[in-house]
Image (spheres, helix red, strand yellow):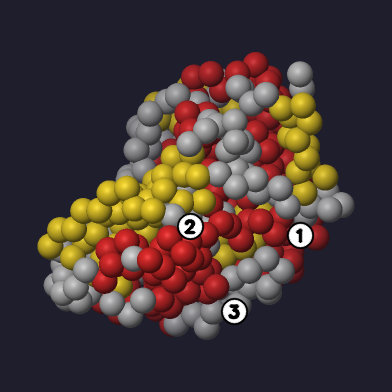
Amino acid sequence: MRINMFITVYGCVYLASHHLAYTLTSWSLRQNFKGHVAHVETRPAPRKGVAFDVLIKIDILREPLLNLLKSLRQGSAIASVNLLSEHHSSIKEAWFPKHISELDMCNHLMTKFEPDLDMDHPGFADKEYRARRKEIADIAFTYRYGDPIPRVAYQQEEIDTWGAVFKELERLIPTHACRQYREVWEILKRDCGYTPDQIPQLEDVSKFMKRRTGFTLRPAAGLLTARDFLASLAFRVFQCTQYIRHHSSPHHSPEPDAIHELLGHAPLLAEPAFAQFSQELGLASLGASDHEIEKFATMYWFTVEFGLCRESGDVRAWGAGLLSSFGELAHALSDKPSKKDFDPAITSVQPYQDQDYQDLYFIADTVEDAQEKFRRWTFQTMSRPYEVRYEPHSQSVQTLDSV
Ligand code: NLE
Ligand code: FE
């Protein structure tokens, strides 16, 4: 099903021209992308070498949107193009992927924290770092379903950052990580090339996960919109960044990077109960309203990213955002932050910030218990007038009318 939606695109234009605005308002937008511009704003860019920041609202269909963004990114006058937000015209008709291959249309980026845009980003003043990020992001932009994930020849500085995080985490894992994480961690070191001296390749880790739980990785250029990110989980696909955080800040990164994905997420996605929980969150998100997506994203934040659980009278971490940040992992299990029991009705509406360590965490008894509570809560609260089933043989989802 194709539906119209409003999107907001943010572009930075190198040349003193209205190139971006021109491309969008021109005949080609209507002809090639079947969209039209609802609003354009151009401002002088605060950055050196960039002439304008351009904000554009477009009414367009989902499929051509992807091609439009791609073609804009290829324009030589354009420094960067990002999707800021999208609003579906009607929730009844919300588009969502029905087959795993349609995740090719689910890679819309959020603009938060990118070194190109955020002055507080540790890489903002580092031109070389920004160029490197762009190079690696291109892999994700050209990736298509079924492709092997291209390998990255990591540079020594990147490997050193990985190694520093690896060694610090290894000290904390025995006392801070949950049992399931500790178990898979050992297997990753034995079978999947996890050592401080080399950054594992996404393709190899993806194969490892596939054998264990059916989860696979696909490369993502950065932080995706919650709708796109959650949708991929429904197909047991994890959208995974491939660049490495800036070397000046190994202990914590505000955005995902390959260290976060490989040390934080991969071990748990390779563990059956966690994989199941992640997929169910994804399935619940398909066709959800914007408001519900917000709740699922918050739920994801406080569980898969920053969740704590109980273990033999102790509290342990199972959130990937903790297990990839030795700074926050120690903080989370100290008595500085507050802690509450996991309860979907409360957790899903708890405000949070995503720049620094959290000051509140939720503790689940076990991941199975969190899952059971989550199931009951979605069943009671979701507005979706149909059920969604995953069909593993064809890797597709089917909708079943529940009325
Ligand atoms: N804070 C995490 C880290 O430093 O690895 C990344 C969190 C991404 C949501
Ligand atoms: Fe994450």
Q: Is mark 1 within 8 Å of ligand 2?
A: no
Report x, y in % for residue 248.
30, 66
Spatial CA span between label 1 and label 3: 18 Å
Q: Regarding mark 3 in the picture, which secondary structure is present there? A: loop
Which amino acid, mark 1? Answer: Lys
Which amino acid, mark 2? Answer: Lys
Spatial CA span between label 1 and label 2: 38 Å
Q: Regarding mark 1 in the picture, which secondary structure is present there? A: helix
Between 249 and 21, the one lying in front of the other is 21
The reply to whether residue 372 is in sight is yes
Which residue lies at the image location 18% right of the left edge and 65% below the top edge? 52
Q: Are the residues tagged 1 and 2 within 8 Å (C-beta)?
A: no
Between 25 and 155, the one lying in front of the other is 25
The reply to whether residue 246 is in sight is no
Residue annotated with mark 1: 210
Between 196 and 141, the one lying in front of the other is 141
Which residue lies at the image location 15% right of the left edge and 63% below the top edge? 45
Which amino acid, mark 3? Answer: Arg
Which label is found at residue 371?
none
Going from N to C along the chain, the mark reached first, 1 or 2, is 2
Mark 2 or mark 3, whichever is nearer to me: 2
Image quadrant in which you'd find residue 352? top left
Going from N to C along the chain, the mark reached first, 1 or 3, is 3
Going from N to C along the chain, the mark reached first, 2 or 3, is 2
Which label is found at residue 34?
2
Which residue lies at the image location 79% right of the left edge and 52% below the top edge? 395
Which label is found at residue 151?
3
